[in-house]
Amino acid sequence: MKKLRIVLLGVVGLLVSMASLANYAPEFSTAGFFQLKDSGREVYSMNVAWRFYKGAVEGAEASDFDDANWGVVALPHGIEYLPTEASGCVNYQGEVWYRKHFEPDHTLKGKKLFLHFEAIMGKSKVWINGQLVKEHFGGFLPVIADVTPYINWDGDNVIAVLADNSNDPLYPPGKPQETLDFAYFGGIYRDCWLVAHNNIYITDPNYEDEIAGGGLLVASDKVSEISAEVTVKAHLRNELKRSFRGVIEYELINNKGDVVVRSESALRLKAQKAQHVTNKLTVDKPNLWSPDSPYLYHLVVRVKDENNQVVDGYRKRIGIRSIEFKEGDGFWLNGKPYPQPLIGANRHQDFAVLGNALPNSLHWRDAKKLRDVGLKVIRNAHYPQDPAFMDACDEFGLFVIVNTPGWQFWNDEPVFEQCVYSDIRNMVRRDRNHASIWLWEPILNETWYPDYFAKNTRAIVESEFPYPGCYCACDAEAKGNEHFDILFGHPSTGDQNWALKHIDPNKTYFTREWGDNVDDWNSHNSPSRVNKGWGEQAMLIQANHYAKPDYQYTCYDALYRTTRQHVGGALWHSFDHQRGYHPDPFYGGIMDVFRQPKYSYELFKAQRSPIQTDILAETGPTVFIAHEMTPFSSPDVTVYSNCDEVRLQVFKEGKRYVYKKQQTEKGIPNPIIVFSGVYDFMADKALARKRKQEEVFMQADGYINGQKVATHRIEPARRPEKLVLWLDDEGTGLQADGSDCVTVVAGVADKNGNIKRLNNYFIRFTVEGEGTLLGDESIMANPRPVNWGTAPVLVQATTEPGDIKVTASVLLEGSQTPIRGELTFSSIGSANKLLFNISEWAGKQKSTNGITTVTTKSEQELIKEVEVLKRELNDLKLKEVERQQEEFGEKK
């Protein structure tokens, strides 16, 4: 018999301090809710230890099928690891199989058991113990099966999943991937949960087919700073053969742990029936949710029997807010006109190496990085995104536009249209309780569909959420746009070829995609599309294009010069990502595929308010010098800042320059600052020859009201001497759940730690301890080429918490090459119960990631000491070389 392993949670605290991120661990919903202790409801992560096979197999659904020779993987799983340049349909398309062996805890016997997949890409079938329990079409919404009748309580259970991401025009997106402008990869690429609860329970909205119902629906009305009315509609089911009497109880808890509202209603559920129960909670002096104050309450719901025993329950996080679109007067939030345009970005959940199969922590870090730069709205292009990302948007104050899956494709076959309608219903049911919901985009992106279809999509959304604050948007040029109050289009201040030719005074406008500027729609050359490795000049051009180019275009400046009727726009695109029909990745992100920043990232950060707030994201004043001080750097020095005044010092005894922002009524909040002709490499050389390298630097100081509030100092990188490593984890740490991963960045640095941008090394990584490296030489993940001075990799946790040591070295080490770098960090216990078999997981061989020799700690220390001694000896030799060059070569 295979051994069972259940790894228990470290209990996640109910409340967190919103003022400090230092000790903050994000929490994520499981199957649409947050777990509540002693509620009679338990959730197990099913992510660990799935047998996997790429290709078609006969009979793999059978419980006794021999899968011993299959590989072993953890979810989220995207079929394969991919190179950073993975556009042009290089990814696998076709059938794949997953099989998971497990033994349920006998304490769950007699409970209802639901298997909840957050998503499976493409066409999928799910079997348990040989019984087909679910068939699903579409890759972006939950796949849920009641597995209660099929569980074997006396031994091994097998879940088998067939997933097929091949082209299929019968369900969205429908368009062949080789003609699609994004890549959706494949596999069970989101989390999988086993939800266990009693036979009296709150249902799942995506499992039940209930219009404006199922599960728990929360809506706010009559919202003001004085009071708010919160409607709570619960759908409960009685699976017993007898009627049930009891109560449903609600507690609304603030972030200090105080119960601000308590309410309960009597329940009477007929045997084997379900019904809805609606309550209204009145909240006095509510803390209202907004981007600058994303206040979340905890709504605790408990179902109790006649003996006051809790039989079911969980927790939701809700924000109380009101949103209104007042035609020509634009967007209103919480009863007040929103004071400035909402600037945001589009987001694909595509990440380097992983494709779409991101663990929850990476979704959270994405949201934080986007909020760090001051963005206020994210468009989920072009599909509903991971629940973890939606949870994070609630926390960070990011409004979200939720999209129906689709892109430039319509099929007249009725089954396609019905699949779209089903997707719309299920995305509303899944996401309706999020405070971050701003707009629903139920139409198909850039698609010539019938106008009746557009009317139907809006009607479906409003039927599913018939409460205040439910708004739908549509392209201004699309058929059926007359049925929508919010239209997508470009303003007259932007690109004249795309600008709206007619403005309806009864509509509100928003630019769903701005910033891209291709020569034609085949070649896709654009000043907005810049790989970070192309260097300073290219990144400066991209940033200038997004800010305020010298040609009329829809840019940051143009969006700030609109009337209130045009409420903002979303950049295309926040991150570099892979595409289907084009051979090149999309390089227009303000960050690359590993979420490493380009200069545009700093430009956007400079547009945020300089006022420091206590939200989880980075806020306040900033100043950044977009210059590397190389021999090829421009004499002009560009600075991005949100300060009133910037003072730049060039060299220790050099000149000082001052910029003072001119107060203007409209336009980009903080224009790009350029100090012309202030850098001269020959001046650097002159000081370096005099051994005065320490006098060569640039420092920018930002001032507000005469007080220095921000500083950025840079130095030119000298001789590359070492590799330095750091974590890009936004302070969240790494969970030992077999799935979580973190970005580790290796930088080529001089002795002072300055990153040497201009080099072409390859970096080899090794990992020891409770972590593994994702990807290998076959996809150039290890060794990885250096790009603009750095080489990022992904390190995944095992299921055991502990230390992880990452070592980086240049591929071909020599006596004069940079010294290897090391980074040690620790993973923490999983926040969820993990249900898996030890013997299955042990079958996953721990990758050595290039380690061919195991050395003891003392041997490692000795190797390091020898390297340091070699370096010191080499330094002495180099001084003799320098002396000879000075004596016999050019001295000036």
Image (cartoon, helix red, strand yellow):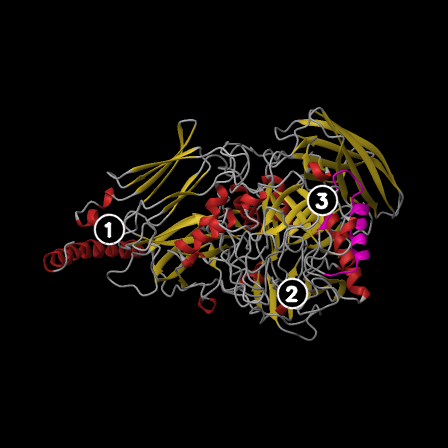
Q: Tell me if label 1 and label 3 are in contact, CB under 8 Å.
A: no
Instruction: Name the image quarter holding the N terminus.
Output: bottom right
- Residue 449 lies, with reference to residue 202, above or below; the image says below
| Left or right: residue 606 compared with residue 207 | left
Disc assigned to residue 837? none
Q: Is residue 631 magenta?
A: no
- Residue 261 lies, with reference to residue 395, above or below; the image says above
Instruction: Name the image quarter holding the C terminus.
Output: bottom left
- Which of 389/640 is in front? 640
- Residue 127 lies, with reference to residue 373, above or below; the image says below
Q: Please say whether residue 525 is visible from this viewpoint.
A: yes
**Real-space CA distance between mark 1 and mark 3, rounded to the nearest whole angstrom:** 70 Å
Q: Position of residue 2 (x, y in %)?
A: 61, 61
Q: Which residue is mark 1?
A: 682
Which amino acid is tagged 1? Met
Judged from this view, the residue extending furthest toward the left is 887
Q: Earlier in the sequence, mark 2 or mark 3?
A: 3
Disc assigned to residue 41? 3
Helix, strand or loop under label 2: strand
**Real-space CA distance between mark 2 and mark 3, rounded to the nearest whole angstrom:** 25 Å
Q: Position of residue 742 (x, y in %)?
A: 49, 52
Quadrant in the picture for residue 143: bottom right
Q: Read off the magenta span.
A: 448-474
Q: Which residue is mark 2?
A: 99
Helix, strand or loop under label 3: loop
Q: Tell me if label 2 and label 1 are in contact, CB under 8 Å.
A: no
Which amino acid is tagged 3? Arg
